[in-house]
Image (spheres, grey):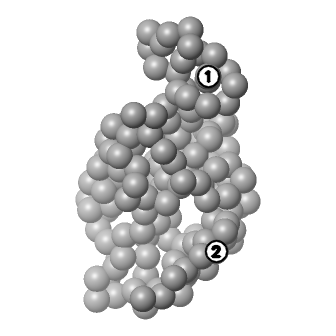
Amino acid sequence: MTTIEISHFNDFLAIARRQSEPQQLLMVFTRRELPQGCTPEQEALFNEGSGGHLAPVVCVDKAPTAFSDFQTLKNESHQTVQNWDVVFIAALPARNGKAPEKTAIDEMLDVMVEQIKNGRTSAYLAFDAQGEPLQLTSAG
């Protein structure tokens, strides 16, 4: 088994570009928010930079060749959503050289959004707004 270290989004992008089958990258941009009816303790934690939940704000699919690097993706994202905290990524591979169909892409993006809303993020890579990889933990 080969171990691959990803220390920045650009590492992931390079790996996606090297795959034998073309990849379609599925991305869900999220923003850290407080839940409705939060407690004062939850609000205090949130204000200190922890706590809250990640709410999906926009999702998109792109071929790895559609942008040059993380900064380009970040700049493009700010045309749609000004502030986001974490982007979740999945790769949908082509089959026999044929790119995934739009319906399959849309269905997978819907699944990603629902899983993120429910805190089930372990199947996805997560990067912060600087392109650094994140390992998220649940508060329980």
For mark 1, does the 10 Å Cα neighbourhood hold few (<14), some (14 to 19), or many (20 or more) residues?
some
Judge whether residue 58 can be spotted in this image: no
Residue 65's place in the image compared with 52, above or below, is below
Q: Residue at x 33, y 37 (%)?
A: 118
Amino acid, disc 1: Leu
Q: Answer above or below: position of 60 versus 99.
A: above
Amino acid of disc 2: Asp
Q: In this view of the protein, which residue sits in the foreground, 55 or 133?
A: 133
Q: Is residue 125 left or right of residue 92?
A: right
Residue drawn 29% across the image and 49% down it:
111
Question: In screen coordinates, is 43 left or right of 93?
Answer: right
Residue 44 coordinates in the image, percent (x, y): 63, 16
Q: Residue at x 53, y 87 (%)?
A: 18
On the image, numbered disc 2 is attached to which residue?
11
Q: Could you tell me which quadrant the C terminus lies in?
A: top left
Q: Earlier in the sequence, mark 2 or mark 1?
A: 2
Tags 2 and 1 touching, CB below 8 Å: no
Residue topped by disc 1: 45
Seen from the viewer's position, the closer of residues 72 and 140 is: 140
> Which quadrant of the view contains residue 65?
bottom right
Instruction: Determine the secondary structure under disc 1.
Output: helix
In percent of the image, x 52 and y 78: which residue is there? Answer: 16
Give x and y (percent) for residue 106. Answer: 32, 54
For residue 116, what is the image quadrant? top left
Mark nearer the viewer, 2 or 1: 1
Query: Which structural element holds mark 2?
Result: helix
